[in-house]
Amino acid sequence: MAIAINGSGTVTGISVGGLPDGIVDSGTLATNSVDSAELIDGSIDASHLAAAIKAGPYVRAYVNSTHSNITNNVFTKVILNGESYDTASEFDPSTNYRWTCGTAGKYLATANLTWDQPGMVADKRHKVMIYKNGAQTSHNETWTAVGGEFSQSVTDVYDMSATDYLEMNCWHLAGVDTPDVQAGAQTTWFAIARII
């Protein structure tokens, strides 16, 4: 039976229990026409959410061997030549040391860098940075209190199109070319995840 609304607003053609599955989809609803007030408690469960959530891919890359003698006052790409995971094979750990987006969306990115102790100079400026498409977008600048090992990190959310890329860079103003970036999956790493 067809659904009809007469001139007085009376609806006919709907049986007890409402519409059969598949009759109404996102193409037939006005934007924001259904919110939590219109949903029956328990009508959406984990099986429904799994299909709706579009998170991922996920990547985590790290420095596999010490990146030595970072040049003073030069923005330097961090050589991320190891991977903890790369669910869509979008990270390049051998040539460009960067992640290239394959699926447009919003991404959370965190870069963590540990400066190694042997070449550190006290009371100097150091940065860890995230670059998008070759331009610096976020950074954390720290003044070292002592000449020892220390870590710094930066996190940001990026609106990415397919083929956009993110990379991790560092910089220091120690006055010497001796600071090193420490190797290790737990010390110097770059993690990216699609959140929307």
Image (spheres, rainbow, N blue to C red):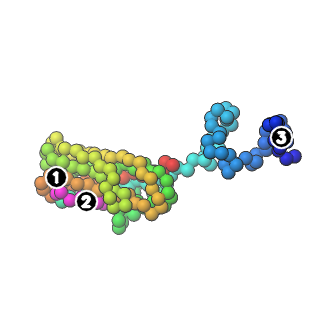
Mark before the other along the chain sequence, 1 or 2: 2
Read off the residue under disc 1. Answer: 173
Read off the residue under disc 2. Answer: 76
The residue mark sitting in front, 3 or 2, is 3
11 shown above or below 62: above
Q: Residue at x 19, y 44 (%)?
A: 143
Q: Nearer the viewer, residue 19 or 85?
A: 19
Question: Residue 194: x, y in percent?
Answer: 48, 51
Asked whether, in this view, residue 58 is left or right of residue 183, the answer is right
Q: Residues within 10 Å of mark 1 (few under 14, many from 20)?
A: some
Q: Are marks 3 and 2 in contact (CB under 8 Å)?
A: no
Mark before the other along the chain sequence, 3 or 2: 3
Q: Which disc, if any, is residue 6? A: 3
Secondary structure that dominates the magenta span:
loop
Q: Residues within 10 Å of mark 3 (few under 14, many from 20)?
A: few
Q: Residue at x 28, y 51 (%)?
A: 128
Question: Residue 175: x, y in percent?
Answer: 12, 54
Question: Residue 166: x, y in percent?
Answer: 38, 57
Question: In this view, which residue lies farthest toward the right?
Answer: 1
Q: Amino acid at mark 2?
A: Thr
Span highlighted in magenta in the image: 72-79
Q: Nearer the viewer, residue 100 or 2?
A: 2
Q: Amino acid at mark 1?
A: Leu
Q: Which disc, if any, is residue 145? A: none
Q: Are marks 1 and 2 in contact (CB under 8 Å)?
A: no
Q: Residue at x 31, y 46 (%)?
A: 153
Q: Amino acid at mark 3?
A: Asn
The residue mark sitting in front, 1 or 3, is 3
Question: In this view, which residue lies farthest toward the left?
Answer: 175
